[in-house]
Amino acid sequence: MNLLLTSFKWPLIITVLGLVLSWWLGWQTTGTIGGALSFLMIGAVLAVLEISLSFDNAIVNANKLKDMTPLWQHRFLTWGILIAVFGMRIVFPLLVVVIAARIGPFEAILLAAREPQEYARIMDGAHLSISAFGGTFLMMVALNYFMDAEKEVDWLRIVESRLREWASVKGLEVALVLLIALGFTVTLPDDQGAEFLFASVCGLVTFLAVELIGHVLDSQEEATRTAAQGGLGAFLYLEVLDASFSFDGVIGAFALTQNLFLIAIGLGIGAMYVRSMTLMLVERKTLAQFRYLEHGAFYSVLVLSIIMFIQSLAHIPEVITGLLGACLIGLSLVASIRYERQAGGH
């Protein structure tokens, strides 16, 4: 218990402050105790939503962080959380409205404060592009993990051994993602199909660009520069990855409330827990202790990417997304514990 309190001290403090701020925001907005309670409850639900949707994010982050230098680990866990909270939970929704409505950032803030329903309508209108971009990026992340010739451990051997064999075919994962994107494109009306395909290609190019930057920085000859710059490449990769994970939560939050500031508070609380979970996984080497845990996380990423694609055709409640991810991670955890017991028995 003391260990958990130490690991989650700051998230618990932020939770208290965030819920108090949610209450105050509700009181200022509605002027009633009932309104303040409603804002308080929505803030708490948003935090839980973010945690449930992002646990696989923490595992994937930890998988990348364990190979980074301590300096860049610290930078990601400090600068990265600021970018995650303020960038994705506040700046990103504003930027979408700025581009979609062709207004300035200040006007977008005023729109969020004065006309939250119109703000939510504009965000919902951008959902197709966001789903295509995020789904493509996350699918590339998952396939890049499984289609790796150097990957040694398999959880679902029938599936993963075949995918590992296919890794020898260069560019196959790119072709698979493009084929899936094209399949969704032809099922959408012409105008929506063009929008979906463009956003999907942008997601693919972003993934490849981040990978290229990482390879270029990691290939520097000087040892000291390699460590630092390689950390920068991984840092950029993790930031884009976090952004892709966050798309679903940010858009889903508008189903609960149109108040941008309440969304930022609720999702910000959740982001702090994700940071602490990531730190705990890295410091205690949890991924090494649980053999198949990261497999479950990457299967969860793959499922999330497919769900984001499907959401271009039909709405899928965020609770289903969260439950599927939690089940996959839970099953991989059980399989890891079973493996450790069998290995210990021998």
Image: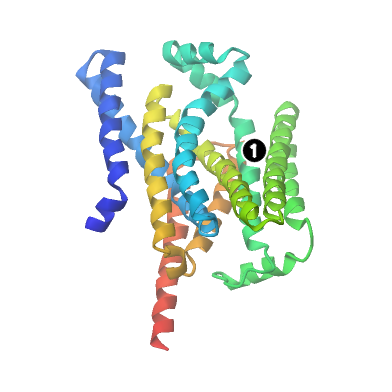
Identify which residue is drawn at 42% across, 14% down: 113
* Mark 1 Cα-neighbour bin, 10 Å: few <14, some 14–19, many ≥20: many
Asked whether, in this view, residue 150 is left or right of residue 319, the answer is right
Relative to 67, say whether 96 is above or below: above
Relative to 153, say whether 260 is above or below: above
Q: Quadrant of the C terminus?
A: bottom left
Residue marked by disc 1: 133
Residue furthest toward the bottom? Answer: 346
> Which quadrant of the figure has residue 270?
top left
Identify which residue is drawn at 75% across, 48% down: 179
The percent position of residue 229, horizontal first and vertical second, equals: 63, 49
Secondary structure beneath dot 1 equals helix
Relative to 94, say whether 273 is above or below: below
Closer to the camera, 155 or 13?
A: 13
Instruction: Name the amino acid, label 1.
Output: Phe
Residue furthest toward the right? Answer: 170
